[in-house]
Amino acid sequence: METRIHKILYQWFPDAFSDDKKSELESDYITLRRFAKYEMKLINDNCKNKKEPFKIINLLYSKGSLYEKNTIENEFFRVIATEEKSMTLKEHLNLMPEALRSVYLKVILQN
């Protein structure tokens, strides 16, 4: 069964998942982990659309269930936080909608 996270991310960002065929059995955790790696590639390559993934994550997070919020925190933000450096923190926070900044900082502090 396709989840809300699968549906939205695959619809808005097909390039993030173009390396293989879409799997209905792929968990939200794996999908968000792959999407975070895609976002980090956009940031590292300084692509002009590097803010867009954060806008969609904000939409998913703000309208999401507790399960979806925990999944986003544990997978999407954790991947980004593990690659965070003190020199890039401000830049990454500026890419995020304001509502996500506190969530991201919480994830950093918990890890």
Image (tube, grey):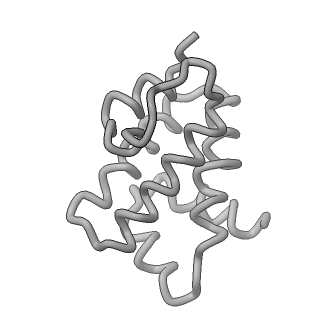
57 shown above or below 24: below
Looking at the rendering, which quadrant does residue 44 occupy? bottom left
Which quarter of the figure has residue 42? bottom left
Q: In the figure, is residue 49 to the left or right of 35?
A: left
Residue positioned 33% across, 36% down in the render = 14
* Quarter of the C terminus within the rendering: bottom right
Give the residue at the far left of this rendering.
48
**Which residue is rendered at x = 57% and y = 64% of the image?**
80
Extreme residue toward the top, this view: 1
Residue 48 in percent (x, y) is at 20, 64
Q: Is residue 81 above or below residue 20?
A: below
- Furthest toward the right, the residue is 110
The image position of residue 45, as x and y in percent, is 32, 72
- In x, y percent, where is residue 83? 60, 73
47 lies above or below 77: below
- State the quadrant of the N terminus: top right
Rendered residue at 49%/29% (across/down) = 63
Q: Horizontal placement of 109 versus 29: left or right?
A: right
Q: Position of residue 18 (x, y in %)?
A: 37, 39
Hey, which quadrant is residue 85 in on the image? bottom right
Residue found at x 58% / y 50%: 76
In the image, 66 versus 27, the foreground residue is: 27
Give the mark count: 0
